[in-house]
Image: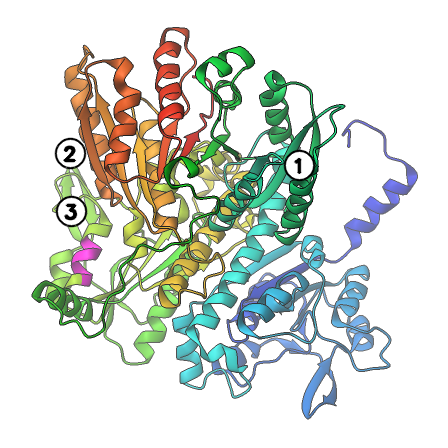
Amino acid sequence: MNEYRRKTPEELLQSIAGLHRGKLKVYIGAFTGSGKTYHMLREGHELLQQGIDVVYCAVTTSARPETKQQLEGLERIPSLKWMKKGSEMKDLDLNVILARNPEVVLTDGLAHRNQPGSARPSRLEDIKHLLANSISVIVTVNAIELEGARLLAKQRVELESADTVPDDVLATAHEVRLIDVSPETMLKRIGDGSLGSKIPAPLFSRGSLAILREIALRHMAEGVIGTLEKHREEEGLTGPSGVGERILVAAQYHWNGSIYVRRGHQIAKRLNGELTVVAFVKIGTRLTREAESFRQSMKKLCHKLNAPFSELPLQSRRKLSGQLLDYARSNQITRIVLGHSKQTRWQEWRSGSVIHSLLSKAIGIDLFIVADRTELDGERMLPVRNNEKPSSRYRRLSGPEIERKTQSIRRGRFKVYMGAAPGVGKTYAMLREGNSLLAEGVDIVIGLLETHGRKDTAEQIGGLSAIPQKRVDYRGTVLHEMNLEAILERHPEVVLVDELAHTNVPGSAYKKRYEAVQILLDSGISVISTMNVQHLESLNDAVAGAIGVRVRETVPDSILGGADEVVLIDAPPSLLRQRLKDGKIYAQEKVEQSLSHFFREVNLIALRELALREVADDVDERLEAWQRSGALRGPWRRKEVIGVFVSLDDQAESLIRRGFRIAHRLKANWHTIHIDTGVSKKQKEDQACIKSLQALAERLGGSFVLQSAPGARSVGREVVAAAKRLGCSQLVLGQPVRHWHRALGGRSIMRTVMADARSMDVLLVGRTSEK
């Protein structure tokens, strides 16, 4: 809407009504017992301290001590009780609530159905009535009670909710917050009886808990990405956000068309992206009988995969790349999937090459070229072989294997609280868990704590004792670091270590805090730590693209992958911005600058979406390790080896990180390949750059292959030769720079690779600009 247009009388009335309407906040949990009610009641106390009139009604504690304790001090409005199949049900007493007229009502069970014959059939309708009467509501709901997640939960874990609410209810909420809990924590709660006796049978399985948790995380992520696109549009930002994946398959009505669609579906599922399929048909040309048959089968396949299918008129072959890119950009596509060219170089010169044309234009969009496996072994179907050799359970373990297993038993447990941004409450949650463990008699201390002057966080220290920090003199300034030696000497059962990505003072025994944490774990000391999603090494480029900030302090993904538990602390952007304004995150002098830079709402939404997806991926990876058939994304059945070709340019580090993420998702080995032509005049600088790239690749768990070539024109051949020698099934390259003085060399490499690597999948990573 144009902000300068005068509003109509009807629009003015709607705006005024909106000012008087109550606000809705929803706490979502993956399952019963995740802590939704506890957090809702705790917020009720915070609002009460701010002078806001708060009451609660129809709240179920299930006799959980911590939750019952939160009821103390809050005013209760009795609920209307009735029996259903031997269980006591609680309806809201709307007449009493309206007569009392509080500012906020706390209640459980958004999906609750009222007693038959009630004025309104459901709690949702009751809540709508309260909101219309200027009463705000904070309510809880389980993810499987959302209509969109109900069917998936039923299919995956045979757990179905009798009552559900439409997904669009969340879109109308002022704020939605996920309470994330790991399966290990849930099983502990079930085991010690703190969740009561009415726990559904599927919740007694770690695998089932993980599936429900992943459903909740992904459901939240889908909602967040929709909000992100809306805010980007309002701010005039165009193109993909760089956070969520959207895959477009460009298919033909040919026998291999369905192969491309299935391959695109594999990619979309593995990357948790959306799949779209498009086919171009020449205007005025009638399809052959065979092509019509392929067309119908492709439509059925797209329907089965729930992938939108579009058929567009083909103007000419030379215009096809432009049409494809226009469609991709208008649909926020991040990756185009198509097949290798079947044309000879002469045919490409005469009628144009779609792939090479896309290469020169597809700024910010990746191209995935599906391998032509008929050239290699005559396959006409996607391979489903698994080349992994089954291990015999009767084989005697070798000495090194026994040592590794012994070390894993001695090693301490590692838990990480992850958040999307500073101020979400990671340290608060870590300290709260620390005090709970202390109350259970666990020997636990604080190894390093960063309160940043936050009063609420400092109050959570409670009875926890701290190991005095080490004083370090650096350039005339006294700084403080974690005292690793003192912790090792004290040797507690558990130590709390804040801010995992922190860089230590120059000259310290360990450059990064996570290195010291590894020493503690290897010494048999368990560690609970915190970090933000933007500090994860492989997400460095995604974060820079999404929020325009390049994070310098990073943690290798292997550190997070080695954690026994990863728990997300979720907080909506509106809550974070309010905490910032209230001085609860940074000092007041930093507030205005932070609000207009890092803490812009569109940035916080993007980081939240990244965090939700990253933890969901982590859950899926662990689930797949536990039970091969249990992962929502499904196992990647073909044995993959990834080759990443890098030049000494500004795209090299980004390509290595991309290669790692692909290999990590596919459970694949991966190699970084660099071809040294020996013609550069900057030998010293080049050697330093090569060492830096090698260090990055090895830090992320890959190998670095350095190979020589007689000149620039032979680079393409050497790349393909190295990839084949390494057994690569997928080759990853960067989009060439379009500068006129480099175009010839770049095009030569690409043309050679496209011609010689047709038996491999080729991923061409798009540049964010033409520079």
Label 2: state its secondary structure.
loop
**Quadrant housing residue 670:** top left
Q: How is the image coloured?
A: rainbow
- Find the magenta span and give its range: 516-521
Instruction: Say whether residue 410 is left or right of residue 356.
Output: left
Q: Name the residue under label 1.
A: 291
Task: Give amino acid for label 3.
Answer: Tyr
The one nearer the camera, 549 or 213, is 213
Task: Give amino acid for label 2.
Answer: Arg
Within 10 angstroms of label 3, few (less than 14), some, or many (20 or more) residues? Answer: some
Q: Nearer the viewer, mark 1 or mark 3?
A: 1
Q: Position of residue 132 (x, y in %)?
A: 81, 60
Q: Mark 2 points at which residue?
A: 475
Instruction: Check the image and report above or below for 128 versus 276.
Output: below
Q: Mark 3 points at which residue?
A: 510
Marks 1 & 3, CB-CB < 8 Å contact = no
**Quadrant housing residue 413:** bottom left
Q: Which residue appears farthest toward the right when viewing the image? A: 9
Instruction: Check the image and report above or below for 457 versus 7.
Output: below
* Marks 1/3: CA–CA distance: 64 Å
Q: Nearer the viewer, mark 3 or mark 2?
A: 3
